[in-house]
Amino acid sequence: MNHNNATMKINLLMLLCVIGVTSCNSQNRNDLLSMHFDQPITVLIGEHKLEQFQDPNYGIYTYKTDQLDGFKIADIDLSTYKYPNGPVADFNRIQIYVDSRTSKKYLGFRYTTVRQDEIQELIASLKKNYPEFEQRKDSAGDVYLWDLKSLNAWLFYYPNHSVDGNGKDFLNSNFLYVKKGTRLDDSKDSSIPTIWQQIDGLYPKD
């Protein structure tokens, strides 16, 4: 009887461990800061029905969506959202960067958000988790640059302003995360600026 009880307890513990690992993997799978660079994201593209695109600002191949439920950045859950009474294009969306449309290997993301409370939550979370950063000033507000050596990545936050139908200003902001060394158009030509150089030029130090 004792042997049976012990066996049942062991089996139960093993089951709980499997459930725990599965749950953690499920939670981390769509955490955009936890995804590994240079790994194919074919499953993610299929699960979320992501649309092919090319980032007009940085020239990198992307897969995009405005259906954000299930995605995370660190400990912040992203959500599908459009700014009330805002311009047509002012809604939350994610662009997931890849090296090419053939191999679809992860290079990072650009997250555009108009949800005002979420912007502040994300900034606070990133500053807490990654306390070494550069802070610069822009007419639209503070800009942040992170050189994340532990992740082999660069992370940037830069704000823009939009105006709603009542003439009220609101933030339309971007969180940009890329593999360290990535250049515009994901070029391998050393004469082409890196993303860091591009951001540094747009938001220079005082």
Image: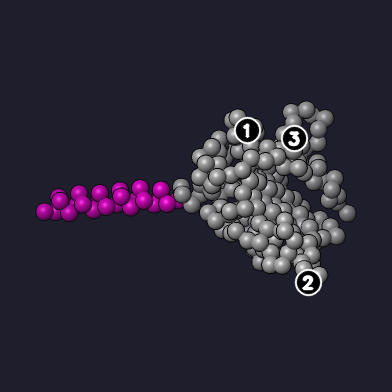
Seen in the picture, residue 173 relative to 109 is either above or below; the reply is below
Q: Nearer the viewer, residue 19 or 62?
A: 62
Determine the secondary structure under disc 1.
loop
Residue 193 drawn at (x, y percent): 81, 36
**Based on the displayed image, in which of its 4 quarters is residue 150 positioned?**
top right
Which residue is under mark 3? 185
What distance separates the C-alpha of mark 3 from that of mark 1? 13 Å
Q: Amino acid at mark 2?
A: Asn
Name which residue type carries label 3: Asp
Q: Secondary structure at mark 3?
A: helix
Q: Which residue is mark 1?
A: 101
| Identity of the residue drawn at 65% across and 53% down | 93
Q: Quadrant of the C terminus?
A: bottom right
Q: Does the magenta portion include 37?
A: no
Query: Would you say 157 lies left or right of 191 here?
Result: left
Which residue does the numbered mark 2 point to in the structure image? 166
